[in-house]
Amino acid sequence: MINFLICFFPVFGNIHGHTSYSDGSGTPRDAYEFAKFHNLNFYGLTDHSHHLDENEWQNTIFWADSFNNTGFVAICGQEVGKLNYFGHINVYGKNLNEVIPEKCWYNLDSLYDYIYRKDLFGVFNHPWENHFKNFKFKEKYEDFICGIEIMNKDSVYEKACIKALSKGWKLGFIASQDNHEMNWGIERNKRGRILQTAFIVDSLSRENIFKALRERKTYAFELFPDQDTIFAELKVDDSISGKYVLKNSPLIRVNLNVRAKIPFIKIFIFIDSLPDSIFVYSSQIQIQREYHISEGKHFVFAKLIQADFDRVWISPVFLLIKNKFIIYPSITSEQDMRLNLQNKNMAVFSINGSKIRFPEKVHRGILFIKKDKKRQKIVLIK
């Protein structure tokens, strides 16, 4: 059994759906009633702000509050933006008490500023090519843009997610059904899978769902068969997904604990954009890997594939490595090297004549070498 931090557990649902108040079907009452009947832990409506009038928005809030109870969390937000301008961002928060103003539908900076001033938070939706000004990073708003859809219906946006993370955004992964028909929370994509997002909480409440989203404590997965719920936890050292970790050592320990009914066949541990792939065959995964990474900012996340090809992405842990003693030798190409054990405690190898030492217990890892402002990868194998 997976051991999360004391009293923390995952809850499952969908936070992107529509009604006839924008380009969907039915009413907010229909949607929440349907999702609750189908045993989702939470459901979020996000009708398009440019379709909503104020009465419709207040009615959405009313029904969300009416269905929000100890057994089910009803969430309401707004999907903001015109696709031909900057894309779509889902906006949530307890201070979202009006239809978001028209200037935010067309201007990304205006929307960022509105979210910031109202203390709301947002999720990048279906991040198509060059949307959101090519993910230009805005440090002022990094605590207010908290998530990104890594899956939406039939599309996977892994490359876009890595791009956004590489630009500096700290984002949790979201899987969205983007419901437009009267199948809120149980819609299947073309592969027959139901997309779900898990939030890690200490109790089921709207406040805690919002807190988990703001803290990036999420993972995104495909559900099939319907009973094959995935339970997942990623830690870097002792820090779970969403945490920002400051370290003065280049050594990190990645711990991955995952279980489901269908066995997993492959694991990818991403250090920034570079994956370390591991072949497995088990319905319960408990592994640890050690990596040496360069000084600077990094993100670490995991992707797993099941035997029936369902996928799960676990949100990143964010790192800042500060160590003036890390050596960056000059190299000319990516290369594999075998460690030459010199004594019982240390392993020594050379790159272009520069000797580097690592603890003997390091069995496999990735060392990032900086050269001309670019990263090059060296795989260490003992």
Image (tube, grey):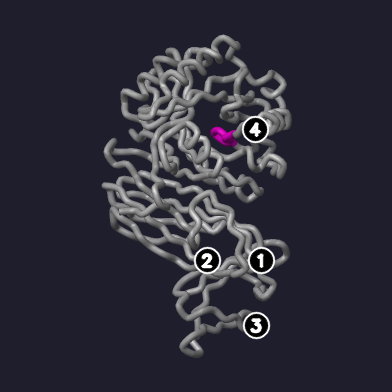
Mark 1 highlights which residue?
Answer: 322
Which residue is rendered at x = 37% and y = 24% of the image?
A: 35
Q: Which residues are magenta?
A: 122-128
Marking on residue 119: 4
Left or right relative to 273: residue 290? left
Q: Answer whether residue 225 is visible to the viewer in this image.
A: yes
Which residue is rendered at x = 63% and y = 38% of the image?
A: 144
Q: Earlier in the sequence, mark 4 or mark 3?
A: 4
Identify the amino acid type marked 4. Answer: Asp
Marking on residue 354: 3
Query: Residue 297, located in which quarter of the rendered image?
Result: bottom right
Residue 27 highlighted magenta (yes or no)? no
Image height of 15 relative to 253, above or below? above
How far is mark 2 from mark 3, CA to CA?
Answer: 23 Å
For the residues labelled 4 and 2, say whether their Cβ atoms are less than 8 Å apart.
no
Left or right relative to 149: residue 8? left
For the residues labelled 4 and 3, say whether their Cβ atoms are less than 8 Å apart.
no
Question: Disc 4 or disc 2, which is closer to the eye?
Answer: 4
Query: Residue 117, located in which quarter of the rendered image?
Result: top right
Image height of 65 relative to 366, above or below? above
Q: Earlier in the sequence, mark 2 or mark 3?
A: 2
In terms of secondary structure, where does tag 1 sit? loop
Marking on residue 252: 2
